[in-house]
Image (tube, grey):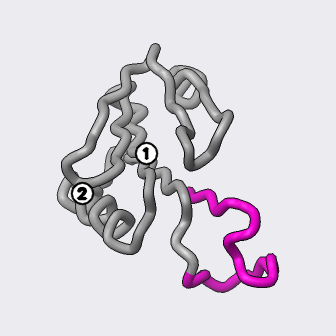
């Protein structure tokens, strides 16, 4: 899942095609079939193309990780908050609300 802020898509025209505009927020939900290496590869790809904020939500572990870079990572427990920070100002929710 991803979020692109209003005003970042040229002409504000939404299409069914992939955009060249990297999202402001990418959210990766880990499934039981996902290989850890594949998840890390996708995180690296998001960050490499300029996504400033990546959330990796693991419902099975009831936890998430917030990436701003490959070295700037914050762990989030189920009672902690996911925060949109400056990327999605005003968005904040307890992780438990998303995974329950």
Which is nearer the eye, 20 or 17?
20
- Rendered location of residue 16, percent (x, y): 72, 81
51 inside magenta stretch: no
**At x 74% / y 68%, what residue is drawn?**
7
Give neighbour class at mark 2: few <14, some 14-19, many 20+ (Cα, 10 Å). Answer: few
**At x 56% / y 49%, what residue is drawn?**
87
Q: Could you tell me how far apart the alpha carbons at marks 1 and 2 are, in whole angstroms?
A: 12 Å
Region in magenta: 1-20
Which is nearer the eye, 18 or 87?
87
Q: Which mark is residue 55?
A: 1
- Rendered location of residue 47, percent (x, y): 34, 64
- Rendered location of residue 42, percent (x, y): 32, 64
Q: Is residue 4 left or right of residue 66?
A: right
For label 2, the residue is: 40
- Rendered location of residue 74, percent (x, y): 30, 34
**At x 38% / y 47%, what residue is drawn?**
30
């Amino acid at each position: 899942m991803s979020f692109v802020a209003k005003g970042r898509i040229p002409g504000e025209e939404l299409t069914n095609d992939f955009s060249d505009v990297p999202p402001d927020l990418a959210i990766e939900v880990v499934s039981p079939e996902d290989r850890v290496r594949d998840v890390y590869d996708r995180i690296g790809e998001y960050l490499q193309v300029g996504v400033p904020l990546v959330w990796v939500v693991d419902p099975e572990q009831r936890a998430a990780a917030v990436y701003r870079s490959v070295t700037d990572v914050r762990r989030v427990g189920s009672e902690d908050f996911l925060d949109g920070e400056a990327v999605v100002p005003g968005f904040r929710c307890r992780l438990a609300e998303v995974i329950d």
